[in-house]
């Protein structure tokens, strides 16, 4: 009986160690966009270790305010989803250079982004679009929601995201389920 018990424990430990080893090898994968035969682009081997560097989400208003979200990852990959009143609607990706990434860091430091309030709003004010931005500096993630009564420097930071929208390097993301046969 003791031998059966020892065999069960040993087997359990071996299985546990093997599954940990398998998951650790998956962490080294990288984000890769592959150009297919039809000149479509799709994600392959998306990394779980590529963490979010900066982001923006713009909300709708009663008028024609641009509505989109953009996430920039430490690798420089940018994911963009355009919804309304933007040049590109749908999902797109872009690769930033290190100097473009550094521009976000420099602007955030210059405007003292980490010292800003977490929220700038007035619930009495209506029909004003909002924007939520975030960035990670020195290992600290800061997120700022702004709708009303915010410092003008925040707009300068948001402009860095808006400027990326004008790039001609965007590649549309084609989801397998959206392809037509």
Image (cartoon, grey):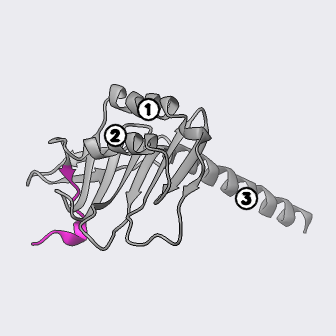
For the residues marked 2 and 3, what is the alpha-carbon distance in whole angstroms? 55 Å
Q: Determine crowd level at label 3: few under 14, some 14-19, many 20+ residues with C-alpha closer than 10 A.
A: few
**Disc nearer the start of the sequence (2/3):** 3
Residue of label 1: 107
Q: For label 1, count other residues whose C-alpha is less than 10 Å away and answer few (under 14), some (14-19) or many (20+).
A: some
Image x and y of residue 29, in percent: 43, 43
According to the picture, the residue beneath numbered tag 2 turns out to be: 160
Mark 2 Cα-neighbour bin, 10 Å: few <14, some 14–19, many ≥20: some
Residue highlighted by disc 3: 11
Q: Are marks 2 and 1 in contact (CB under 8 Å)?
A: yes
What residue is drawn where x is 31% and y is 35%?
Answer: 96
Position of 39 with respect to 157 (left or right) is: left
Residue 138 seen in the current view = yes
Question: Viewer-proximal residue, 181 or 16?
Answer: 181
- The residue under the point 56% across, 56% down is 119
Query: Which sits in the foreground, 139 or 48?
Result: 139
1 lies above or below 100:
below
Q: Earlier in the sequence, mark 1 or mark 3?
A: 3
The magenta span reads: 171-181
Mark toward the viewer: 1 or 3: 1
Residue 149 vs 112, above or below: the answer is: below
Mark closer to the chain start, 2 or 1: 1
Quadrant that contains the N terminus: bottom right
């Amino acid at each position: 009986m003791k031998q059966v018990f020892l065999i069960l424990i040993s087997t359990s430990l071996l299985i546990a160690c093997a599954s940990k080893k398998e998951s650790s090898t998956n962490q080294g994968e990288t984000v890769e966009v592959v150009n297919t035969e039809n000149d479509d682009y799709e994600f392959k081997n998306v990394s779980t270790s590529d963490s979010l560097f900066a982001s923006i989400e713009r909300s709708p208003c009663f008028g024609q305010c641009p509505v989109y979200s953009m996430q920039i990852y430490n690798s420089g990959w940018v994911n963009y989803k355009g919804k309304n009143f933007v040049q590109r609607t749908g999902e797109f990706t872009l690769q930033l250079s290190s100097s473009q990434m550094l521009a976000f860091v420099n602007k955030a430091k210059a405007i003292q982004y980490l010292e800003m309030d977490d929220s700038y709003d007035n619930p009495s004010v209506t029909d004003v679009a909002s924007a939520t931005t975030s960035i990670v500096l020195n290992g600290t993630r800061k997120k700022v929601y702004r709708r009303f009564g915010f410092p003008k420097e925040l707009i300068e930071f948001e402009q860095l995201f808006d400027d990326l929208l004008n790039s001609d390097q965007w590649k549309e993301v084609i989801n397998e389920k959206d392809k037509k046969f």
